[in-house]
C-alpha cells in the first residue's frame, strides 16, 4: 500500500501570512496531510513568543488549502468541551470540502493549563477525562445537523500502553506517536493485543508515526512494518518555515511508492 507523508507546520514564532505560505507550499510539494497543533505558548524558542490558537489555525488551514487532509496533531482534550470540539471539526470539515481528521490527546503541557486556568491534575486524571469524553465526541458527530461532510476519522496521539493504546483500540481510526522502528514494533504489538481483546481488526487502525530525530533514518523500516503515514514537524523561528526536511521525505515517499 502506498505510504503517505504528513507535515506539522507548528504555529509558533511566525506571522499568519508566514503560516499560510508554508501551508500552501507544503500542499504544492505534495504533502498528503498538513497538521497544526494545540497549545497556547511556544514549546521551544522564546517561551513568550508569537503563538496561534489551534482551532483558529485549523480553520485558516482549511481555507488556505484545497487538497491535503488537515487536522491537529493533536488537540488537547482538556481545553474545550468535547462536544464543542466535535461540532467545530464538523464545521471546518464543510469549510475544507471533507478533508478534516480529529486528532486528540489527553494533554501534557502544564504552562497552558496554569496560564489559562485549567486543572492540570495528574496524567491518570487527564486520561480518565479522555476516556470519558471520547464517546461524547463520537455521539455528537452522529447527531449534528448538518452532519460532517465526510466520516471524520478520530486520531489519538500517545504511547501509553495500558490506557492510551486501549483507547486507540476502542475509538480511533488513526493512531499517532513518535518512535524509532524498535519502539514502534513493540507499541504496535501492544495495540494489536488490545484490539484482539475487543474483537477489532488491528488493520482497521492506520498508524501515523513521527520521530524526535530524523524520520528518514527510520523511514524504510517503518514502511516495511506497515506504517500508513510518516510525519515531520516544521517549526517557525520568525524567519519563515524551511520545508527542506519535508522535501526530502516526499522524495523518499515517491521513490518508495514507485518501487513498492
Image (cartoon, helix red, strand yellow):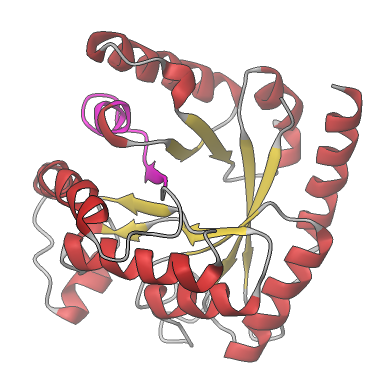
Q: Residue at x 45, y 37 (%)?
A: 174
Q: Is residue 202 left or right of residue 76?
A: right
Q: Which residues are magenta?
A: 153-169
Residue extending farthest to the front is 146
Quadrant hosting residue 8: bottom right
Quadrant in which the N terminus is drawn: top right
User: Please, is residue 136 above or below residue 258 in the view?
Assistant: below
Relative to the observer, which residue lies in front, 69 or 218? 69
Q: Is residue 235 left or right of residue 192?
A: right
Relative to the observer, which residue lies in front, 107 or 27? 27
**Residue 147 position within the rendered picture, expressed as x and y whole percent measured from the top left:** 33, 59
Q: Is residue 204 left or right of residue 82?
A: right
User: Please, is residue 9 above or below residue 137 in the view?
Assistant: below
Relative to the observer, which residue lies in front, 42 or 102? 102
Q: Is residue 43 visible?
A: no
User: Please, is residue 47 above or below residue 235 in the view?
Assistant: below
Does the segment drawn in magenta span residue 160?
yes
**Residue 138 position within the rendered picture, expressed as x and y whole percent measured from the top left:** 23, 47
Does the segment drawn in magenta span residue 231?
no
Number of residue marks: 0
**Residue 13 position within the rendered picture, expressed as x and y whole percent measured from the top left:** 56, 83
Quadrant hosting residue 253: top right
User: Please, is residue 244 above or below residue 209 in the view?
Assistant: below
Q: Is residue 231 visible?
A: yes
Q: Residue at x 88, y 45 (%)?
A: 251
Q: Residue at x 54, y 58 (%)?
A: 99
**Residue 74 position within the rendered picture, expressed as x and y whole percent measured from the top left:** 40, 56
Q: Residue at x 39, y 14 (%)?
A: 192
Quadrant in which the C terminus is drawn: top right
Amino acid at each position: 500500500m502506498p505510504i503517505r507523508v504528513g507535515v506539522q507546520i507548528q504555529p509558533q514564532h511566525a506571522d499568519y501570512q508566514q503560516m499560510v505560505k508554508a501551508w500552501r507550499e507544503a500542499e504544492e510539494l505534495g504533502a498528503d496531510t498538513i497538521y497544526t497543533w494545540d497549545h497556547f505558548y511556544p514549546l521551544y524558542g522564546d517561551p513568550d513568543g508569537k503563538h496561534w490558537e489551534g482551532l483558529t489555525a485549523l480553520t485558516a488551514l482549511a481555507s488556505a488549502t484545497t487538497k491535503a487532509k488537515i487536522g491537529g496533531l493533536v488537540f488537547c482534550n482538556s481545553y474545550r468541551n468535547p462536544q464543542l470540539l466535535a461540532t467545530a471539526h464538523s464545521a471546518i470539515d464543510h469549510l475544507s470540502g471533507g478533508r478534516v481528521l480529529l486528532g486528540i490527546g489527553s494533554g501534557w503541557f502544564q504552562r497552558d493549563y496554569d496560564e489559562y486556568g485549567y486543572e492540570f491534575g495528574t496524567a491518570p486524571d487527564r486520561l480518565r477525562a479522555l476516556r470519558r469524553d471520547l464517546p461524547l465526541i463520537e455521539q455528537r458527530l452522529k447527531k449534528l445537523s448538518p452532519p460532517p461532510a465526510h466520516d471524520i476519522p478520530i486520531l489519538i496521539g500517545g504511547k501509553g500502553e495500558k490506557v492510551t493504546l486501549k483507547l486507540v483500540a476502542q475509538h480511533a481510526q488513526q493512531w499517532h506517536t513518535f518512535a524509532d522502528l524498535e519502539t514502534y514494533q513493540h507499541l504496535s504489538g501492544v495495540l494489536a493485543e488490545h484490539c484482539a481483546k475487543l474483537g477489532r481488526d488491528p488493520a482497521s487502525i492506520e498508524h501515523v508515526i513521527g520521530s524526535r530525530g530524523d524520520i528518514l533514518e527510520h523511514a524504510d523500516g517503518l514502511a516495511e512494518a506497515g506504517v500508513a503515514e510518516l510525519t515531520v514537524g516544521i517549526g517557525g523561528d520568525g524567519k519563515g518555515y524551511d520545508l527542506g526536511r519535508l522535501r526530502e521525505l516526499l522524495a523518499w515517499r515517491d521513490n518508495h511508492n514507485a518501487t513498492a
